[in-house]
Amino acid sequence: MEKFISVIIPNYNGSSTIGKCLEAAFASSYGSFEVIVVDDCSSDNSPAIIKQFPCKIIELKTHSGAGKARNTGALHSRGDVLFFTDADCLLSADSLSVVNKAVGEAGDDAVIGGTYTQMPYDRGFFSIFQSVFIHYSETRNSSRPDYVATHAMVISGETFRKSGGFREDFLPILEDVDFSHRLRRKGCRLIVDPAITVRHIFNFTLKRSILNAYRKSRYWITYSIMNKDLLADSGTASRELKINGISWLACLSCVLLCALTGDAAWIVLLAAITGLNSFVSRGLFAEFYKTRGFKFSLLAALYYLLLYPAPVWAGTAAGVIGYYSNSHR
């Protein structure tokens, strides 16, 4: 039985991607759905692009954030099932059919998440790295995920209305993590179905990859302190990533101590730490290899081990300083 699905897309200055997003949505082979786009007071020409498609567009008068946009879209929806995605995500032709099947199997009390395809829309190294990293991180614990991300979130309309929706006074990101945690505390089941995928448009360069790692880490640590779950194995903020960060600091210390003392034993310790860290991260490295082969997996592993932890730690430090500075005002 086909459930009526409302596809809800928040948009803010998404002129470079929203057209592709809507083209993909309306290429769906599914028969019973609507598309609602909530424009969050964009200053570019994305509203004009959206109006070229047979979707419902709701234009907010002030820039209010993704939480408000998603809540507004849900308020104006008619679907038995709500499917939240983003303006830089592309559904495949059968995505909604897979969603319908997943809801039928899981039941209306479950909140179901999808994930990114391993290969993103754009094929640059840093975009592929990010897409594989997120895909792997979100599907490792698919039966018991810590949260469900809004780039592919499926929830019954009734459950959403009872939940009170997304917080609108929250951090610039992670409102989906907060939403997932609140629903889980109310007894909802969280599930990730790896068959539900969207293709993301990253257009990542080295700079954008580093800035993204910094920004995500800054707000993750803020939320983790607020939520008292610093050690949680939570999606992209996994224990693997945390071990990678600690290992990076330990290796950096070994290099500095070797330079200061001239004792080669520190290099032996560095090699041991790197080997242990690589073993912990073997699942991610295998995903790199499966996606693009040996050369890509080698370069991606080196980037993850040697450079990626630097912006993660910088964002962590900024988040800790910002949190405690604000709390003592």
Image: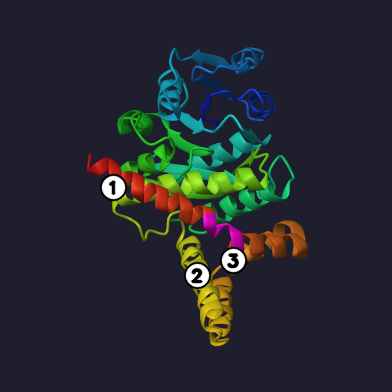
Above-or-below relation of 5 to 215: above
Residue located 54% across and 33% down the image: 85
C-alpha separation, residue under disc 3 versus residue under disc 1: 35 Å
Q: Which of marks 2 and 3 is in front?
A: 2
Q: As shown in the figure, which amino acid type bears the numbered disc 1?
A: Tyr
Badge 3 density bin: few <14, some 14–19, many ≥20, Cα 10 Å: some
Image: magenta residue range: 306-310
Query: Looking at the picture, how far across and down is residue 76, in whole percent?
Result: 44, 17
Q: As shown in the figure, which amino acid type bears the numbered disc 3?
A: Gly
Rendering colour mode: rainbow
Question: What residue did someone put label 3 on?
Answer: 283
Residue 146 visible in the shown view: no
C-alpha separation, residue under disc 2 versus residue under disc 3: 17 Å
- Dot placed on the residue nearer the N-terminal end, 2 or 1: 2
Answer whether residue 307 is magenta in the image.
yes
Question: What residue did someone put label 2 on?
Answer: 247
Residue located 48% across and 46% down the image: 216
Using residue 139 as the reference point, say whether residue 16 is left or right of it.
Answer: right
Residue 281 visible in the shown view: yes
Quadrant in the picture for residue 303: bottom right
Closer to the camera, 125 or 284?
Answer: 125
Query: Looking at the picture, how far across and down is residue 3, in whole percent?
Result: 51, 30
Label 1 sits on a secondary structure element that is helix
Closer to the camera, 61 or 100?
Answer: 61
Query: Looking at the picture, how far across and down is residue 239, in whole percent?
Result: 45, 63
Label 3 sits on a secondary structure element that is helix
Question: What residue did someone put label 1 on?
Answer: 324
Using residue 266 as the reference point, say whether residue 221 is left or right of it.
Answer: left
Above-or-below relation of 264 to 206: below
Q: Which residue lies furthest to the left in this view?
A: 328
